[in-house]
């Protein structure tokens, strides 16, 4: 009876964990899960983790049963007498055994671990890989494609990688302010973005789709709302997307009033729109704002309503973000939203 | 041996006024009074840290909750971590070491009683300084606020650009001041154990409790010094124009991480080795057998002490070290599991063939064995560097180290509280309330921390004040919060038991557990001078020798 409740809770928790990690219905394929790898680094980690889980699981079962056996078998029985049990001080053979066996287990674990560390960290970069520089900001992501001349934010587009013609994406990780961490559980383990300390990581997603993640290193007030979306496109989609992103901002004369508002109320101090005077780098590049599904680092959908809210009162969406409340009058705001709507 | 004739005369105490008795406590250099003050001080901060945890759990109960603002939430987790590590677990461990080490080695006090009092008051004022930030954190120009950079205070969040005002300075100074206190106490423990043992107590006859606290004290000195150095460097950065950690001026954020974790990981063992010490005293007494493999237990502890100094960067697998460094810290991390495993096996060996009595202290120790086993195994998962790239910084890590600190250290501490309560107060605690506390706490603990692993596997990072619905985290977080409330109720039962039993408990007598170490040979509570005559010992279990003259231990050692 001893610890029965504890054991029951443990078992229930274990079953629940299994159900949640391996039995999630297909409808929520977007749910991040380290046990559903969709890219080589995540896959290698997944297989190593199964190996480690098997070893630790066996150790758990063995030691757990020994402890339960000891407390049941050697418990003081009712009506007990006052005599003491035989006094045993130790046993060199037994102690040697439970020292040597763990040492062997440690060696096995180490070899398996070192192999995966080397494979992931020292992987060569093939010439056809896509290069991206990811820069962490309080509290959003900047993505620059140096070879393609693209700058975007919060939504990373990468091509799907066919194992026969791999096109992996190699990321250089930088930070503009505090520490951040790039974590999309289905694609790879996390790597930190640290100022003055460039890091590297790579992914090669095998299936198209949207993969969710978020900043995993505490970076300040709105660390919780620094979400991350990775769009894995087919080769054709990616090339199409890249072509659109390379272009300068469309100059739609119908939104001329909104453009004047944008260029005269301080927006350009932080935001860039290529092909115009706006060249700020403190906030996200807005050249192709309308090509993104979300605003404010994935926290709100990119609709005119949310854009209005975001411009007038960012704290109502993301308290403590560095975007100032613009407090525009209605006419200016309407014009500005119309202008932003032309940034496709 | 001492007898009842040396007990304090109650009439004598009653004639003194409250202020006189308070004065006695403030100016005392008695190791027992200082020990009690450390313990009470830690219990007060335990309640404060627990309230901070509860605020966080209410906020995370459902997605997009707005119980507190992000700023308040960030202060809560910073203060919760700092409080629990520096102002709960360290002081309570020092409290028990202070109270018990001189009694166990047959000494009349610590080696340096005045240093002892000085160290306590430094630690005490350190805690007050930290909490004063709530009032003075913003300096003169506004309302105060507590630090909000996390208890690791990673650079550059501590730079003036990101932490204006004085909240980071209160954090720095609090840790500096209490760090000096910790080093003072550590030196004192070392000197006491080395120099103050009674006749006949060789190092190989010393109770494991004293041995383990000796190792802990050495580790405190090795761990606190780099932290203190780093805090001074941070002060230089913030006020004298230094650039050690100021990344905007070319400083290194990674340097701070190394300094912090060179302190931070040995610190884990500073906290857990005294917990091992409790188990090594309690399990033998309630199994009615001597500790299994005493020399191996000592060797394993010293081994943990050394190996744990070389594992710090397993907290930094994601910061971009090269593959050789990652491999090195992976193997040292696995290696530290070997001596730790030996300890679990030796406690098992102690229970094996014994006659186990399920008194409340033993229940908590058995809880420790199960939970520390799981904590160790999740530790192996986290030590596997590639697996760590997924798990690090997620709720899996939060669950893992709470398994160590709550499921391990706090359970051992509760066991210690119940085991030595009769010695410290002279009265027995209420056994029924003790068992209620145990079962409530077991249920609450497992509800909270078993389930907390899973959101981590599903991508939930730690230190987020809110989260998006629909990621499979909602139900789990709700249940985790329920578990936290159950634990809160259990703590209330515990505190009530401590207070009520102090007045209404049955008289304990000198030796309620039929135990074997020297503290049980004197009265409960012990007189100021501990022993009327300094005892002479001939084995590891001096009281066993007296109770069983026909079969004394010294024949076999």
Image (cartoon, grey):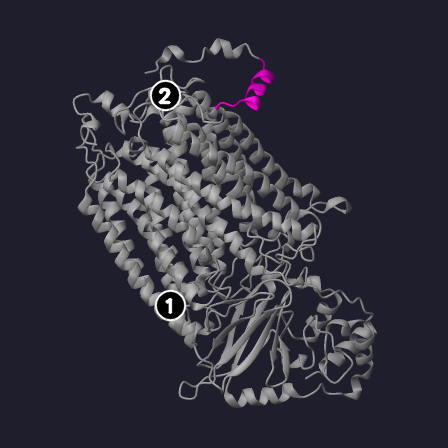
Q: Which residue in the protein does label 2 denote?
A: B508
State the quadrant of the C terminus of chain B: top left
**Is residue B25 inside the magenta stretch?**
yes
Are discs 1 and 2 located on one and the same chain? no
Residue B444, visible in the rendered structure: no
Which numbered disc covers residue B147? Answer: none
Residue B340 lies left or right of residue B401; in this view the side is: left
Query: Which chain does the numbered disc 1 sit on?
Result: A
Q: Position of residue B39 (x, y in %)?
A: 49, 32
Camera-nearest residue between A189 and A124? A124
Q: Which residue in the protein does label 1 denote?
A: A22
Camera-nearest residue between B452 and B186? B186
Residue A222, visible in the rendered structure: yes
Query: Which residue is pictured at 47% across the width and 54% down the height?
Result: B398
Q: Position of residue B550 (x, y in %)?
A: 16, 22
Q: Position of residue B324 (x, y in %)?
A: 42, 66
Q: Is residue B259 above or below residue A158?
A: above
Quadrant of the rendered image containing residue B219:
top left
Label 1 to label 2, Cα distance in Å? 54 Å
Main SS class of the magenta portion in the image:
helix
The range drawn in magenta is: B17-30
């Amino acid at each position: 009876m001893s610890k029965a409740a504890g054991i029951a809770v443990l078992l229930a928790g274990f079953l629940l964990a299994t159900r949640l990690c391996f039995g999630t219905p297909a409808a929520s394929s977007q749910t991040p899960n380290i046990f559903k790898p969709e890219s080589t680094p995540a896959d290698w980690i997944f297989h190593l983790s199964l190996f480690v889980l098997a070893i630790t699981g066996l150790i758990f079962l063995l030691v757990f049963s020994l402890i339960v056996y000891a407390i049941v078998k050697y418990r003081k029985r009712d009506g007990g007498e006052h005599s003491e049990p035989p006094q045993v001080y130790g046993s060199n053979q037994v102690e040697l055994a439970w020292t040597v066996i763990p040492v062997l287990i440690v060696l096995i674990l180490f070899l398996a671990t070192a192999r995966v560390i080397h494979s992931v960290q020292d992987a060569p970069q093939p010439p056809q890989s896509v290069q991206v520089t990811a820069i962490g900001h309080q509290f959003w992501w900047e993505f620059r494609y140096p070879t393609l001349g693209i700058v975007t934010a919060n939504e990373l587009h990468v091509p799907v990688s066919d194992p026969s013609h791999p096109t992996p994406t190699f990321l250089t990780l930088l930070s503009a302010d505090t520490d951040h961490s790039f974590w999309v559980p289905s694609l790879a383990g996390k790597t930190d973005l640290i100022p003055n300390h460039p890091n590297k990581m790579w992914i090669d997603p095998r299936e198209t789709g949207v993969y969710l993640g978020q900043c995993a290193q505490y970076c300040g007030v709105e660390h919780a709302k620094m979400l991350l979306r990775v769009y894995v496109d087919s080769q054709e989609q990616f090339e199409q997307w890249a072509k659109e992103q390379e272009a300068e901002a469309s100059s739609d004369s119908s939104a001329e009033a909104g453009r004047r508002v944008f260029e005269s109320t301080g927006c350009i101090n932080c935001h860039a729109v290529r092909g115009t005077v706006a060249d700020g780098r403190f906030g996200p590049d807005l050249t192709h704002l309308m090509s993104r599904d979300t605003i404010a680092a994935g926290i709100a959908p990119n609709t005119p309503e949310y854009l209005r809210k975001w411009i007038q009162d960012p704290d109502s969406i993301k308290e403590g973000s560095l975007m100032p409340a613009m407090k525009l009058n209605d006419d200016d705001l309407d014009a500005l939203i119309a202008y932003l709507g032309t940034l496709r | 041996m001492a007898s009842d004739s040396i007990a304090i005369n109650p009439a004598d105490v009653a004639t003194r006024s409250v202020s006189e008795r308070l004065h006695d406590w403030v100016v005392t250099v008695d190791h027992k009074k200082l020990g009690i003050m450390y313990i009470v001080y830690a219990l007060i901060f335990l309640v404060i840290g627990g309230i901070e945890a509860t605020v966080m759990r209410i906020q995370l109960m459902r997605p997009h909750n707005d119980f507190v603002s992000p700023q308040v939430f960030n202060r809560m987790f910073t203060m919760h971590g700092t409080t629990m590590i520096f102002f709960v677990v360290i002081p309570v461990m020092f409290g028990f070491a202070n109270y018990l080490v001189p009694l166990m080695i047959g000494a009349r006090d610590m080696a340096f009683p005045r240093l002892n009092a000085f160290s306590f008051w430094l630690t005490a004022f350190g805690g007050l300084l930290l909490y004063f930030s709530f009032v003075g954190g913003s300096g003169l120009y506004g309302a105060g606020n507590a630090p909000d950079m996390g208890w690791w205070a990673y650079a550059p969040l501590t730079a003036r650009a990101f932490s204006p005002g004085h909240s980071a300075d209160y954090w720095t100074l609090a840790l500096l001041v209490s760090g000096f206190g910790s080093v003072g106490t550590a030196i004192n423990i070392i000197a006491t154990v080395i120099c103050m043992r009674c006749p006949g107590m060789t190092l190989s006859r010393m109770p494991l409790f004293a041995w383990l606290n000796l190792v802990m004290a050495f580790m405190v000195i090795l761990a606190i010094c780099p932290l203190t150095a780093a805090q001074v460097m941070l002060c230089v950065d913030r006020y004298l124009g230094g650039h050690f950690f100021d990344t905007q001026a070319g400083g290194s954020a990674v340097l701070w991480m190394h300094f912090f974790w060179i302190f931070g990981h040995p610190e884990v063992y500073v906290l857990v080795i005294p917990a091992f010490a409790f188990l090594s005293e309690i399990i033998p007494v309630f199994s009615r057998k001597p500790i299994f493999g005493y020399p191996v237990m000592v060797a394993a502890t010293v081994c943990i002490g050394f190996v744990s100094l070389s594992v710090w960067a397993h907290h930094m697998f994601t910061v971009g070290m090269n593959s050789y460094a990652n491999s090195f810290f992976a193997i040292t991390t696995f290696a530290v599991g070997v001596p730790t495993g030996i300890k679990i096996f030796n406690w098992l060996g102690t229970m094996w063939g014994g006659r186990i009595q399920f008194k409340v202290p033993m229940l908590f120790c058995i809880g420790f064995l199960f939970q520390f086993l799981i904590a160790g195994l999740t530790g192996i998962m986290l030590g596997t560097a590639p697996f760590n790239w997924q798990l690090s910084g997620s709720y899996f890590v939060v669950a893992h180290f709470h398994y160590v600190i709550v499921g391990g250290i706090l359970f051992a501490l509760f066991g210690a509280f119940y085991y030595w309560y009769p010695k410290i107060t002279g009265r027995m605690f209420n056994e029924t309330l003790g068992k209620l506390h145990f079962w409530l706490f077991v249920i609450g603990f497992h509800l909270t921390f078993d389930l907390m692993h899973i959101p981590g596997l599903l991508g939930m990072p730690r230190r987020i004040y809110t989260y998006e619905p629909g990621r499979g985290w909602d139900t789990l977080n709700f249940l985790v919060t329920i578990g936290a409330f159950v634990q809160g109720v259990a703590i209330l039962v515990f505190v009530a038991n401590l207070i009520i039993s102090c007045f209404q408990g049955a008289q304990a007598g000198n030796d309620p557990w039929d135990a074997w170490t020297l503290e049980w040979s004197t009265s409960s509570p012990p007189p100021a001078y501990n022993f009327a005559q300094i005892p002479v010992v001939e084995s590891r279990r001096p009281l066993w020798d007296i109770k069983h003259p026909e079969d004394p231990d010294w024949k076999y050692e």
